[in-house]
Image (cartoon, rainbow, N blue to C red):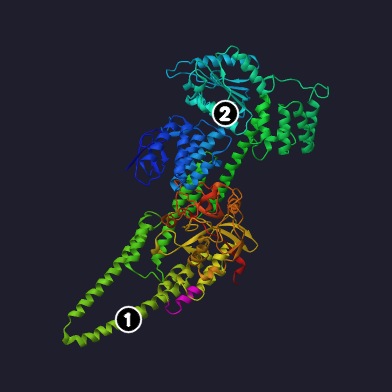
């Protein structure tokens, strides 16, 4: 048992060697674990996690990077760097008592695009990967909220960075000095961020959105301290280190260290290249203000605006008016050009940036912005317009974004709802109803989704019971292969006992028990008769032998002639009475007696002619290989497929699915994706198996992959009979490069069975919910990963981030372009192929 400290709360974690996920007994949080090959690495992680829990993110990041220099495949080290970059602090949720993340170092870059996050996914195992994806989603949602708030904040000229209280909670001298500096700069007309005053009306809310906005808008930061340790206080350093990072990334900003009562050589090493200011020096404040004015290259601060004179007219209104007239007429380039003319005169004119935004979006009127298909808050002109807008314009612009988001969310929910409703009306099997119930559960507060979820669950239970009942009754009637055995009746009893009370299940159980007793009585009578014959005296053996021979002859006559003849005549009488079910049940028991098989075959043909395909299919299945029964079975399936619509479920072929090989293969359910001319594109409804894309971690394309060979050889011959394979054409597949990473997709290929590509998965399954798939019991037994919601990962044929990685669909339905190593053993397989219905034989 290995002991390690929880990265959330610092409590003790106990886990077995090799574990990559554990739950903390102290805070109850499920979390990923690092590689702990030796005590030294464990100590490094404990030290780094200690710094991170105390929000000393830069110190922690340095140790995580040291770990990666020793082992560049440690997924947890990459993930820990992500936590540091975004300043993730875990706090206790009062409701659940679990630790949840907060973001203290917001970035414009999404966590999903972070290179360290991508590396963490690349080297993680299945359990780690699931948690990383889930937590990254939480962090990304928090960050979106921060960015949304920060965009509404007015820009600042100066950011004052200082320590507010000492270790005893008392106000520091730094705070007093910062307060004086704030009032001096404000008096000069500068817009100043001073947390003591700027954030005083933000009590009870998270400060990060406002700090983030100020750090990114302020042209100057003054870092003020009276002690060396105050410069390195956690939150002080958090602010100035982020500001320095912006400068390193090319932002035109200036950081000014200001100190008092200390040696300038005690300043942080990061300030060694900066010109520091001594607060105690006479004239410090005047020099600082003059320097700030020079840096901003304008003695007019951010909150002072002039009226700009254009060609002596005293106003830029005519230029703006012409720009918006061009927008109304759809002259986008002219509108943009006139907005630029306005900005040449007034670089901070919000209306001009609004006009440029409208030209970029090709919107005629401002009010039409809310009709845009997607939110435009990621457009640069929107952000600048918002920065310089007055309160009225800012409210309108943010209102447009809120309207678009609300409209699109309602459309998304309605699409899920209507899709589920359609699927519910078409559902027949237990699995179909359960899948729809899960879809409704994903939108619990929309319309009557919860009520419909319950209806689907009830219908799923009804379908389950009915399926068990029908299978049991079919088994009672017997089959050519089944025989009239005690074991078969006991199997039927066990099946019916699982649905006791359903229809006449209990009565059928009694029928089975009665038949068992009849069989046992006959077996006992045969045994007693045999014993008596053995005890007979040799003297009468010949006489007895004659009698036995006569009796045997009579028995043979009864079994082979009289009883079959009676059954046969009864079957003919039932046919005459149009009681076809019982008639053909008797004929099935007779097997090859006289023309029993031919009568069943002819009945099946008449049912096909009457388009009663389900009954015909059942009879032909009983006939096995009789005449062209297998070909007729395939024709029935193809006929039903030809009549199916996109979104319907059809049956074709058979594959092991319930992981019980004793009861044979189960019919495969396929979802219809498209219909083109006389061809139908289908994909398996469930993940049918679990296979590696390729057994070696090497550069591979779909053309050279092992999974392609397996699908077109092993799977093809296992799932489809020769008669069924006739209807599966060979098609040419395009294998494009990965659009995001440029990884080579390889040559075009010709295949019968294939996997979806990234483009096809997104084309035929336009939503994440639609792409979610459940594995069969067999696929799960083969190693397919199953999430808490019951869904699985499934392979796509497209390449991922590199040649040894293949794309896949995650458990939540997301398409992962980055992919997973081709040797991975957790992805399920959803085969796809075209069916040529023009091959139907007349």
Q: Which quarter shows the N terminus?
A: top left
Percent x, y of residue 192: 60, 20
Task: Looking at this view, name the residue that lies furthest to the top.
Answer: 282
- Between the residue at mark 1 and the residue at mark 2, the CA separation in whole angstroms equals 100 Å
Task: Tell me, for residue 812, which label it has, or none.
Answer: none
Disc 1 element: helix
Percent x, y of residue 385: 68, 29
Q: Residues within 10 Å of mark 2 (few under 14, many from 20)?
A: many
Picture quarter containing residue 529? bottom left
Judge from the rendering whether residue 476 lies leftward or rightward of residue 813; answer left or right: left
Q: Residues within 10 Å of mark 1 (few under 14, many from 20)?
A: few
Q: Which quarter shows the C terminus?
A: bottom right
Q: Main secondary structure of the magenta part?
A: helix
Depth check: 279 or 222 in front? 279
Depth check: 170 or 470 in front? 170
Please give the range of residues in magenta.
Answer: 592-601
Residue at x-position 63% and y-position 64% = 678
Picture quarter containing residue 734? bottom right
Task: Tell me, for residue 556, which label it has, or none.
Answer: 1
Disc 2 element: helix
**What residue did someone put label 2 on?**
243
């Amino acid at each position: 048992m290995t002991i390690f400290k929880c990265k959330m709360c610092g409590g003790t974690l106990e886990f077995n060697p090799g574990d990559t996920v554990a739950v903390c007994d102290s805070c109850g949080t499920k979390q990923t674990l690092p590689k702990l090959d030796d005590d030294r690495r464990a100590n490094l992680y404990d030290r780094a996690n200690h710094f991170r829990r105390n929000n000393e993110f830069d110190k922690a990041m340095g140790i995580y990077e040291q770990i990666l220099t020793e082992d560049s495949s440690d997924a947890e080290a990459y993930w820990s760097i992500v936590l540091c970059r975004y300043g993730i602090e875990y706090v206790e949720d009062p409701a659940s008592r679990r630790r949840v993340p907060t973001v203290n170092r917001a970035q414009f870059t999404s966590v999903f695009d972070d290179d360290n996050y991508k590396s963490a996914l690349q080297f993680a195992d299945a359990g780690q990967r699931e948690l990383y994806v889930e937590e990254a989603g939480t962090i990304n949602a928090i960050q979106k909220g921060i960015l949304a708030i920060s965009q509404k904040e007015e820009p600042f000229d100066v950011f004052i960075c200082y320590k507010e209280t000492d270790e005893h909670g008392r106000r520091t001298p730094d705070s007093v000095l910062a307060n004086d500096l704030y009032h001096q700069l404000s008096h000069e007309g500068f817009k100043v961020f001073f947390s003591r005053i700027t954030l005083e009306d933000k009590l009870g809310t998270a400060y990060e959105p406002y700090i983030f906005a100020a750090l990114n808008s302020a042209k100057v930061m003054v870092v003020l301290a009276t002690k060396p340790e105050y410069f390195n206080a956690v939150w002080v350093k958090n602010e100035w280190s982020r500001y320095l990072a912006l400068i390193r990334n090319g932002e035109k900003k200036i950081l000014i260290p200001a100190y008092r009562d200390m040696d300038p050589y005690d300043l942080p090493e990061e300030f060694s290249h900066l010109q520091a200011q001594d607060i105690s020096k006479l004239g410090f404040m005047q020099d600082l203000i003059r320097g700030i004015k020079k840096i901003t290259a304008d003695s007019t601060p951010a909150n002072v605006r002039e009226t700009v004179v254009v060609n002596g007219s005293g106003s830029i209104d005519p230029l703006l008016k012409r720009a918006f007239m061009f927008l109304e007429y759809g002259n986008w380039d002219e509108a943009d050009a006139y907005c630029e003319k306005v900005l040449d005169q007034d670089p901070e004119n919000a209306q001009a940036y609004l006009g440029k935004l409208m030209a970029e979006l090709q919107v005629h009127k401002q009010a039409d912005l809310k009709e845009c298909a997607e939110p435009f808050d990621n457009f640069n002109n929107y952000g600048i317009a918002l920065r310089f807008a007055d309160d009225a314009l800012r409210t309108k612009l943010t209102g447009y974004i809120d309207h678009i988001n609300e409209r699109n969310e309602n459309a998304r929910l309605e699409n899920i709802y209507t899709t589920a409703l359609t699927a519910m009306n078409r559902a027949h099997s237990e699995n179909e109803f359960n899948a729809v119930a899960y879809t409704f559960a994903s939108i619990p507060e929309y319309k009557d989704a919860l009520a419909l979820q319950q209806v689907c669950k009830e219908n799923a239970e009804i379908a389950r019971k009915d399926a068990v009942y029908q299978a049991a009754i079919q088994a009672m009637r017997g089959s050519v292969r089944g025989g009239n055995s005690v074991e078969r009746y006991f199997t039927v009893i066990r099946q019916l006992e699982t649905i006791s009370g359903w229809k006449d299940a209990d009565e059928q159980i009694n029928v089975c028990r009665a038949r068992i007793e009849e069989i046992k009585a006959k077996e006992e009578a045969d045994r007693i008769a045999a014993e008596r014959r053995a005890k007979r005296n040799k003297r009468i053996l010949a006489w007895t032998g004659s009698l036995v021979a006569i009796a045997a002859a009579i028995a043979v006559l009864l079994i082979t002639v009289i009883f079959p003849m009676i059954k046969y005549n009864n079957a003919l009488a039932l046919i005459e009475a149009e009681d076809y079910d019982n008639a053909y049940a008797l004929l099935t028991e007779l097997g090859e007696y006289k023309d029993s098989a031919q009568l069943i075959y002819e009945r099946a043909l008449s049912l096909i002619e009457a388009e009663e395909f389900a009954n015909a299919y059942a009879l032909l299945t009983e006939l096995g290989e009789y005449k062209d029964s297998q070909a007729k079975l395939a024709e029935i399936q193809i006929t039903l497929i030809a009549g199916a619509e996109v979104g319907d479920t059809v049956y074709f072929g058979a594959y092991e699915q319930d992981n019980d090989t004793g009861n044979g293969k189960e019919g495969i359910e396929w979802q219809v994706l498209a219909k083109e001319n006389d061809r139908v594109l289908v994909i398996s409804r469930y993940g049918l198996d679990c296979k590696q894309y390729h057994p070696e971690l090497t550069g591979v394309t779909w053309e050279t992959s092992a999974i392609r060979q397996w699908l077109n050889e092993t799977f093809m011959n296992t799932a489809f009979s020769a008669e069924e394979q006739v209807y599966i054409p060979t098609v040419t597949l395009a294998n494009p490069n990965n659009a995001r990473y440029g990884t080579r997709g390889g040559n075009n290929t010709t295949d019968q069975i294939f996997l979806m590509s990234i483009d096809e998965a997104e084309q035929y399954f336009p939503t994440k919910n639609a792409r979610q798939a459940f594995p069969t019991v067999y696929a799960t037994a083969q190693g397919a990963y199953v999430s808490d919601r019951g869904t699985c990962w499934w392979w796509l044929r497209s390449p991922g981030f590199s040649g040894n990685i293949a794309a896949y669909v995650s458990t939540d339905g997301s398409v992962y372009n980055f992919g997973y190593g081709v040797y991975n053993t957790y992805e399920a397989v959803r085969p796809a192929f075209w069916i040529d219905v023009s091959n139907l034989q007349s």
